[in-house]
Amino acid sequence: MDCNDVHYYVESPGFGYNHMNNGGSIHPLRSPSEATPPQMSGGQILFSYDQILEITNGFSSENVIGEGGFGRVYKALMPDGRVGALKLLKAGSGQGEREFRAEVDTISRVHHRHLVSLIGYCIAEQQRVLIYEFVPNGNLDQHLHESQWNVLDWPKRMKIAIGAARGLAYLHEGCNPKIIHRDIKSSNILLDDSYEAQVADFGLARLTDDTNTHVSTRVMGTFGYMAPEYATSGKLTDRSDVFSFGVVLLELVTGRKPVDPTQPVGDESLVEWARPILLRAIETGDFSELADPRLHRQYIDSEMFRMIEAAAACIRHSAPKRPRMVQIARALDSGDQLYDLSNGVKFGQSTIYDSGQYNEDIMRFKRMANGSFADSEFDMYSSEYSSRETSGSALVPKS
């Protein structure tokens, strides 16, 4: 595994000997000569289960900061006084200890300013624990969709889009072999106090084993982000990540959720609602129909155009027609210059996705997630989507 980047460096953590008592204060555990610090194993820190219990105050419910398809997340005070985010993976992983260690070693070698770093792990019988650096300012989903957070202004949205794109591009292009995230969504884009984006949970799909169905309930909860080819082939590629990132861009532009049952019938899916409006916005330069009304039109037109154009290119239904993440990152950060995202889609043509086919695929996807989809039916749709070229507006601006 080689994930080198001359622009960023790896900070080797040094560990002290403090811990949190029941009252939440910090006090010395014991003298350094008596303490048993976590052990280095490869490039990451190996914790014992007793140490995990200690830094989470016995997995206290007061320390729970989140829960998702992969497991519950606890705020943990690390031995050196830093705060970590400890993810207790759900039981049932089919991986043995050797395979788990190998995957952890891969993840721990990935260091980039826009990716959340893994700083430790624990293996105890069937328990699997991962410890990440703590990112203090919530996630993008919260900032966009929960009322207790302040509305993100346009400069922050643009900054978040560029940062997340850079992080994902590094997974795809800066690592050998490439790392496919497999679960890109706004709740996996964490924000620091400066609103710099840090992408979380990359590599976790390989650390769990969804053995019951082709599509787990974890994936079912985020099907609004899933690329259409996943409903037919059950496989995810780097271009599937691109599609999911396009949905995130649409969230940033519109402020809408990927799937919103409160919307009128036929408009519940953000992608399907946005497709025709994206075409009109690119053709006319009028973004009012798409832009989040909470922005009150306070955005830079050229930046809004770039984000809309990038989103439209990302959500093309044909995977080979989507650009690479590195192209998206460059396009978003290209200033006043136009960056070509056509990727073989000629002007005057676009790859239109049939809404009826889309709805059929979503229903098939739901059946897969519920375990009611027979293997024979799944195999019928295992071929990759092919694009259907029709006349219409291109997803690229006129030159």
Image: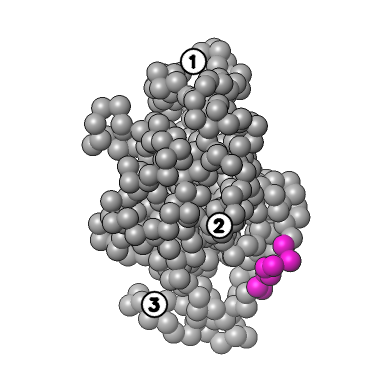
Give the residue number, with chain letter if any, for mark 1. 374
Q: Do the residues labelled 2 and 3 touch (CB within 8 Å)?
A: no
Q: What residue type is labelled 2?
A: Asp
Q: Is residue 378 above or below residue 86?
A: above
Q: Which of 22/388 is in front?
A: 388
Give the residue number, with chain letter if any, for mark 3. 21
Res 240 quadrant in image = top right
Counting the numbered discs, the total is: 3
Q: Please tell me which of labels 1 and 2 falls first in the chain.
A: 2
Q: In which quarter of the image is the C terminus?
A: top right
Q: Are marks 3 and 1 in contact (CB under 8 Å)?
A: no
Of marks 1 and 2, the one in the foreground: 2
Q: In this view, does 289 lie above or below 299?
A: above
Q: Please tell me which of labels 2 and 3 falls first in the chain.
A: 3
Q: Please tell me which of labels 3 and 1 falls first in the chain.
A: 3
| Horizontal side of residue 53 vs 17, given as left or right | left
| Horizontal side of residue 221 vs 84, given as left or right | left
Q: Which of 364/290 is in front?
A: 290
Mark 2 crowdedness (10 Å alpha carbons): few <14, some 14-19, many ≥20: few
x and y, in percent, of residue 230 in the image: 53, 28
> Residue at horizontal 34%, vertical 59%?
298
Magenta segment: 5-12
State the CA–CA distance, disc 3 to disc 1: 52 Å
x and y, in percent, of residue 91 in the image: 49, 44
Q: Which amino acid does label 1 sit on?
A: Ala
Q: Most prominent secondary structure in the magenta stretch?
A: loop
> Residue at horizontal 62%, vertical 86%?
33
Give the residue number, with chain letter if any, for mark 2. 336
x and y, in percent, of residue 320 in the image: 63, 31
Q: What residue type is labelled 3?
A: Asn
Regarding mark 3 in the picture, which secondary structure is present there? loop
